[in-house]
Structure formats: structure tokens, C-alpha cells
Image (cartoon, helix red, strand yellow):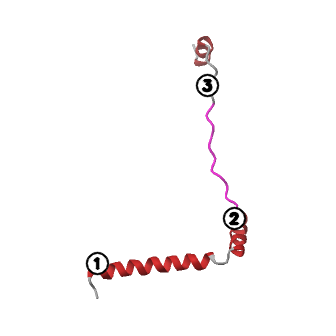
């Protein structure tokens, strides 16, 4: 006796077929357009980003000097 017959006799609905998951396709040109339009609207963002990176590096260097008592 097959599973389909057994499920029907028990009053259960047919088993759902598994859905195959597909990875989303990235549209590089569309993403580039969105990023560029955001940066044109907010030109301060790159300066803030680079400032944060330089600040993080300088803070790390300061802590290394402080911990190892290099100065």
C-alpha cells in the first residue's frame, strides 16, 4: 500500500512537494545606480566613512602604544 493511499484513508491531505530554493540574482548595474544616486544625494557619507575608518585605526594604534608602553 502506497503512502498516498494511506494518507487518503487517514483523511490527511496529500503531502506537499518540497519547494526548491533559488538564490536571488544580483543585478550589478541596478545596485550601482542605487549606490551612486544615494551618494549624489548625500555627498558627506564618504567623508564620514573614511573619518570613521581613520579614527578606528588611530584608536587601535593608541591602545597598542598604551598597552605595550612603547612611549
Ranked by sequence position, the earlier of labels 1 and 2 is: 2
- Secondary structure beneath dot 1 equals helix
Range drawn in magenta:
17-28
- Tell which circle, 2 or 3, labels the residue nearer the N-terminal end: 3
Q: Does the residue at mark 1 contact the one at mark 3 (Cβ under 8 Å)? A: no
State the CA–CA distance, disc 1 to disc 3: 63 Å
> Considering only order in the chain, which callout, 3 or 1, is on the residue closer to the N terminus?
3
Residue drawn 56% across and 75% down? 49
- Judging by the rendered image, the residue that carries numbered circle 2 is 31
| Place of residue 22 in the rendered image (x, y in percent of width and height, measured from the top left) | 64, 47
For numbered disc 2, what is the local secondary structure? helix
Determine the CA span between mark 2 and mark 3: 40 Å
Res 67 label: 1
Q: Residues within 10 Å of mark 3 (few under 14, many from 20)?
A: few
Horizontal arrangement in the rendering, residue 1 relative to residue 41 (left or right): left
Which image quadrant for residue 27? bottom right
Tag 2: Cα neighbours inside 10 Å, few (<14), some, or many (≥20)? few
Instruction: Give the residue at mark 3.
Output: 15
Q: Quadrant of residue 21?
A: top right
Vertical side of 56 occupied by 7: above or below: above
Q: Main secondary structure of the magenta part?
A: loop
Residue 50 position in % (x across, y down): 55, 79
User: x%, y% of residue 47?
Assistant: 59, 80
Q: Position of residue 59 (x, y in %)?
A: 41, 78
Which quarter of the rendering shows the C terminus?
bottom left
| Identity of the residue drawn at 61% across and 34% down | 18
Residue 71 relative to residue 5: left or right: left
Calculate the distance from the C-alpha at mark 1 to the C-alpha at mark 2: 43 Å
What residue is drawn where x is 62% and y is 75%? Answer: 45
Nearer the camera: disc 1 or disc 2: 1
SS assignment at label 3? loop
Amino acid at each position: 500500500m502506497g503512502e498516498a493511499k494511506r494518507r487518503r484513508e487517514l483523511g490527511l491531505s496529500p503531502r506537499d512537494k518540497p519547494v526548491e530554493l533559488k538564490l536571488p540574482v544580483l543585478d550589478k548595474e541596478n545596485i550601482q545606480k542605487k549606490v551612486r544616486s544615494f551618494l549624489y544625494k548625500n555627498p558627506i557619507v564618504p567623508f564620514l566613512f573614511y573619518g570613521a575608518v581613520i579614527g578606528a585605526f588611530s584608536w587601535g594604534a593608541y591602545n597598542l602604544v598604551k598597552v605595550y608602553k612603547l612611549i
